[in-house]
Image (cartoon, grey):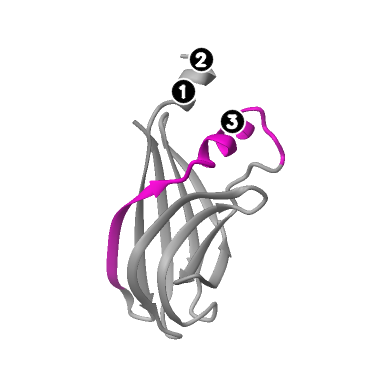
Amino acid sequence: MDIQERLQLPLIGVVSLKWSDENGFKRTMIKKNAIQPQAKEILAKRLIQHPTSVIDQIKLYNGVNLVFAQPITGTLIIAPQEVQFQALFSKDSFSGDFTEARLNCSSIADFSILNGLDATKSSTEGLLITWNIQII
C-alpha cells in the first residue's frame, strides 16, 4: 500500500477521560470522536518527518473559549495501525467546565475533536486524557 492509498483510509478516534483525586480514580468517560480534514495534512507531513507536524497538545474548550491547553505527556504505538496520546491535567492546571476536547498540532490545526461533552474538573481533581487514533 502506497502513501496515497494509506491516507485515504478512514481514521477513528477513541477518547478516555479519567478524573482522579487523592483517593484514586473517581469516574471515567469514553467517547468516539471526529477526525478533522487537516489530519491528512498532518499525517502526510509526519510521514516525511516534517518538523512542524507533531501532535503536541490536548486543548479543552467551553464553547468557543479555550479553557486550558496541556502538552502531550506520553505517546505509545498500540498496534501497527493505532497510536495513543496522553495528557495529564494536574489538580492545579485549571478548574471549571468544558464542552470540547481537541487533539492538536499547534503549528497546523486540530487533528481530532471530541465535542458534546458536559464535563467539569474541580481544583481537587487531576484529569488524564488518553486519545487513541486508529486507521481502519
Q: Is residue 45 above or below residue 124?
A: above
Give the residue pinned by disc 3: 44
Per the rendered image, the range of residues in magenta is 26-51
Asked whether 47 falls inside the magenta stretch, the response is yes
Residue found at x 44% / y 72%:
63
Residue 36 versus residue 16 in the image, above or below: above
Name the foreground residue: 6 vs 16. 6
Structural distance between the alpha carbons of marks 1 and 3: 10 Å
Q: Which residue is identified by label 1?
A: 6
Q: Which amino acid does label 3 sit on?
A: Ala
User: Does dot 3 land on a helix, a strand or a loop?
Assistant: helix
In contact (CB < 8 Å): disc 1 and disc 3:
no
How many tags in the picture?
A: 3
Q: Is residue 106 magenta?
A: no
- What residue would you read off at disc 2? 2
Amino acid type, residue under disc 1 in the picture: Arg
Q: Find the distance from the CA under tag 1 to the CA under tag 2.
A: 6 Å
Residue 94 in the image, given as x and y percentages of width and height: 52, 80
Give neighbour class at mark 1: few <14, some 14-19, many 20+ (Cα, 10 Å). Answer: few
Q: Residue furthest bottom?
A: 123
